[in-house]
Amino acid sequence: AESWQTVPLAPPDSIFKLTAAYKVDKFDKKINLGVGAYRDNDNKPWVLPVVKKANELLLSNPNIDHEYLPITGLPEFTSAAAKLILGSDSPAIKEGRVSSVQTISGTGANHLGALFVSRFYSWGGDKEVFLSDPTWVNHHAIFKNVGVTPKTYPYYDPATIGLDYDGLMASLNSAPPRSIYLLHACAHNPTGVDPTKEQWAKIADLMLEKGHYAFFDCAYQGFASGDLEGDAWAVREFVRRGVSLLVCQSFAKNAGLYGERVGALHVVSPTQETGARVTSQLSVLQRSEISNPPTYGARIVSLILNDPALFEEWKRDIVTMAGRIIEMRKQLHHLLTVELKTPGNWDHIVNQIGMFSFTGINPEQSKALTEKAHVYLTVNGRISMAGLNTHNIRYFAESLDQTVR
Ligand code: PMP
């Protein structure tokens, strides 16, 4: 009988290991810049005021029950979510060629999307997906799990601490026609480096020319710039230009609903008739994976998206979060360049976008920051800007300054 004697011990997840080490650290100035979750200026998790309101509405509704949702999720949630990312006047939605399925947050959307392409993409050759180098580490595991081999395309250039645009374009050019490229819709994790609008347009044109498929992952809509519309620009532009695509959507960060696992997968098809077939197959896959998605978070987001007053309030809450992060970028940049005169160029701190910043420090320096200064960050030098606040930013800047001198 199988007794699992040969099961190898897996390493712990690096981010969660970091948080565990931070928790047992007794140093009073310790800082956790590892995990990508928003914190307020007092380093506390933030329940969005609009979510509190929606929650009260939900709890006071006597008609709420605990029945199963449809397999593809709460219809008023998925349709509003599609409009949020594709635009309220999206021709693709109007023409009825968007298949939207409620998923277990962004991770579940990536998984269902990966499973769908694994099963139904008309693969010319090997099943493979091109991921940015680097990317959210889970992307690799998610595609491997469904039998799609992850390949990488150049993305981050350590020399400029910016986008390796030429490398990216060269990859799009040389990849087999009709390759699948995973693109971060905005606020690239882990680098904080996004293409400019001009670059996005050229990427779209080349993908169209080569017949590549865009697998968009959108985990930070609104978080990047504070503007939901602006952060959806790339996805909408790709749809407008006719690039074949799907989008994975998460409400973990922009609604602060991390643990509630609210997300959606939207597959844009060329025609309504194709879309209907895509929806039918997504339903079959979803049924075997989770049967029905969970109700609570989808109801909360649905209330917010479908009520004009709540929607306006949500936008203000997003500005609060994105604004605080942008302010931390400015303060850190000022401390390093003006006050401490830290060697090197730190403009990337203010040029990068979203929750994360690639500081450009090497693994030895990252480890030294953790060991000597009790600042917890991943060894690739990525910091979560949300872990900085007006109380700890000076200590962080001074520690970083000492590390790189
Ligand atoms: N994609 C990217 C790029 C992410 O950074 C994250 C969150 N770290 C996700 C997807 C998924 O997050 P969740 O499942 O919590 O929505």
Image (spheres, rainbow, N blue to C red):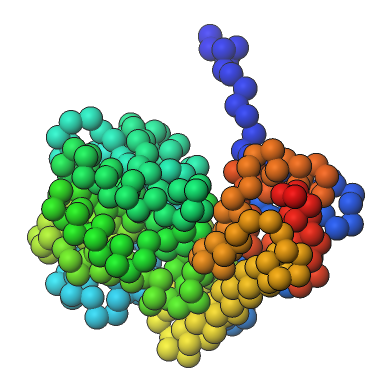
Compared across the picture, whether 259 is left or right of 83 comes to right
Taking the image as shown, residue 45 lies to the left or right of residue 110, namely right
Q: Percent from the top left, x then y, of residue 125?
A: 18, 31
Up/down of 96 relative to 275, above or below: below
Which residue is at a point 19% across and 54% down the rendered structure image?
Answer: 206
Quadrant of residue 292 within the rendered picture:
bottom left
Outermost residue, bottom direction? Answer: 309
Residue 144 lies, in percent from the top left, at 39, 33
Query: In this orientation, which residue lies closer to the viewer: 137 or 397?
Result: 397
How many numbered tags mark residues here? 0
- Residue 396 vertical position relative to residue 122 in the rendered view, above or below: below
Q: Residue at x 18, y 38 (%)?
A: 176
Query: Horizontal placement of 158 versus 68: left or right?
Result: right
The answer to which image quadrant residue 21 occupies is top right
Which residue is drawn at the image coordinates 61% and 54% (left, top)? 359
The x and y percentages for residue 395 are 81, 62
| Residue drawn at the location 43% of the way across and 86% of the way down | 307
Extreme residue toward the top, this view = 1
Q: Nearer the viewer, residue 268 or 43?
A: 43
Which picture quadrant has residue 204?
bottom left
Residue 51 visible within the image: no
Pick the residue in front: 303 or 326.
Answer: 326
Give x and y (percent) for residue 284. Answer: 27, 47
The answer, for residue 369, to whether it is visible in the render is yes
Return the residue nearer the eye: 363 or 109: 363
